[in-house]
Amino acid sequence: MKKKKSQKSEQNRRTVGFLALGCPKNIVDSERMLAEIAKAGFLITSQPEPSDAWQADVVVINTCGFIAPARAEALEAIKHAIDCKRNGTVKKVIVAGCLSEILGAELFGQASGVDAIVGLGQRDAIARIIEKTLGCEQPTCYLEQSPRTINDDRTRLLITPDHWAYLRISEGCNHRCSFCTVPAIRGPFRSKPKKLILDEAEELVSAGAVELNIIAQDTASYGRDLKMKNGLAELLKELEKIAGLAWIRLMYLYPAGITEELIETIVESERIVHYFDVPLQHINDKILKDMRRPDTRESICCVIENLRRKLPDAALRTTFIVGFPGETDQQFEELLDFVKSVKFDALGGFKYYPESGTSAAEMPGQVPDKIKQHRLEELMLTQQEIAFAKNTGRVGSELSCLVDSAETKDAGAGRFYGQAPDIDSICLIRNCSAKAGQFINTKVIDTKDYDLIVEEI
């Protein structure tokens, strides 16, 4: 009898389909929302293939709105969910995240059929909002609470594998880059209290995470608003004490924040991997000034030289924007020459998009899209040659790899310290006897495009 009652109860539970879009910060928000949804008793359904229909009482889409392609992706996903609603496989559609924060009620006009719009400040109220939406016929905005608070990211239903997770240490940004909408969306820079971060890290490691990827909009500035001296370095020293944590990875480090104290902390550490994600955006001084970046070519070069002098095995990752207003052929060539000289381990390239509300969108000298596309292709081909050469140079070397998956002995996948999850290349592992979340010693035996082919020793 108890079994039949349980089955009936399971059948009567209301279902929620959830789609997480955007950056790692958005992933953390999605994981918090999923935890609240699960705690409220909803049954979370799996995401269908792109061509298939959602099958759920409610579909929640947590959106990104940073640049035009991200907004287009979000709107496409929203309209797909609305089509499923019209076809009867979905009852309600809720849109959350950055696009909701940007467009507000305007989104109802752009995507007719949305039932609720949820701002960043209402993240933790998502279960209550789902309940209200199921019982309401009137489309509703939930934007009244300011997103300028400090979020408590503890208790998450992880989207990432159990053995690695993101750890967000601050909210918002105080930089006023002329091309960026993040401060308008996410608000000013706010550091999380150190105890809150450490408690969350303990929770994640207790749940099985051996790698924590430290994220923020500006990681290196951690603690400045709290009047902490060397805030990030001091936080890292505390994180290192957590038993069971093997890798600590730093993402989104502005070059100006890479201090001597931070470098020395990493040099002395056995757990902070020698990986630096440093978004530079450009190298020409005039472009950097027009972008309102706090760096110059000289200061950037000094940071890179210092890192490589003190950490010769450092893996460097960066991002660049091509086609910024006024960028000349000569300035782009300067960027290419810089990339060839520095030889980054990984590089992300983006075309400039004029975002409404930013000063760069009003600048003269907007570069035609055809030229931007050509420059992007040239940049990425230049980096491809560098990356392939670096991979070839690693053949024969030994690497410690964290196993991410091991379906069969010949189909394992993992990463060495120079590969961040989801954004970088991977190691394809042959003769893999380990399970996901374990470390193994490997030898590089070949390459496959950006990936390394390794064999367990």
Image (cartoon, rainbow, N blue to C red):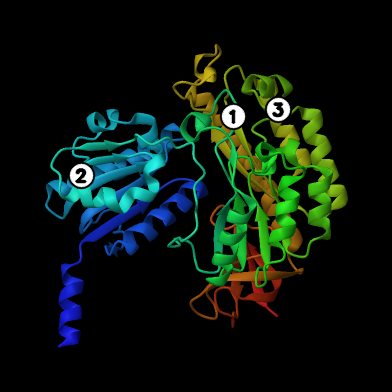
How many callouts does the rendering have?
3
Looking at the image, residue 409 lies above or below residue 20: below
Which amino acid is tagged 3?
Pro
Disc 2 crowd, CA 10 A, few/some/many (<14, 14-19, 20+): many
Identify which residue is drawn at 23% across, 61% down: 15
Residue 184 appears in the figure: yes
Tag 2 residue: 82
**Residue 217 position within the rendered picture, expressed as x and y whole percent measured from the top left:** 58, 40
Looking at the rendered structure, the secondary structure element under dot 1 is strand
Which amino acid is tagged 2?
Ile
Disc 1 crowd, CA 10 A, few/some/many (<14, 14-19, 20+): many
Tag 3 residue: 294
Identify which residue is drawn at 45% across, 62% down: 158
Disc 3 crowd, CA 10 A, few/some/many (<14, 14-19, 20+): some
For marks 3 and 1, give the CA distance: 18 Å
Looking at the image, residue 113 lies above or below residue 362: below
- Asked if residue 449 lies left or right of residue 116, the reply is right
Residue 274 appears in the figure: no
Label placed on residue 322: 1
Label placed on residue 2: none
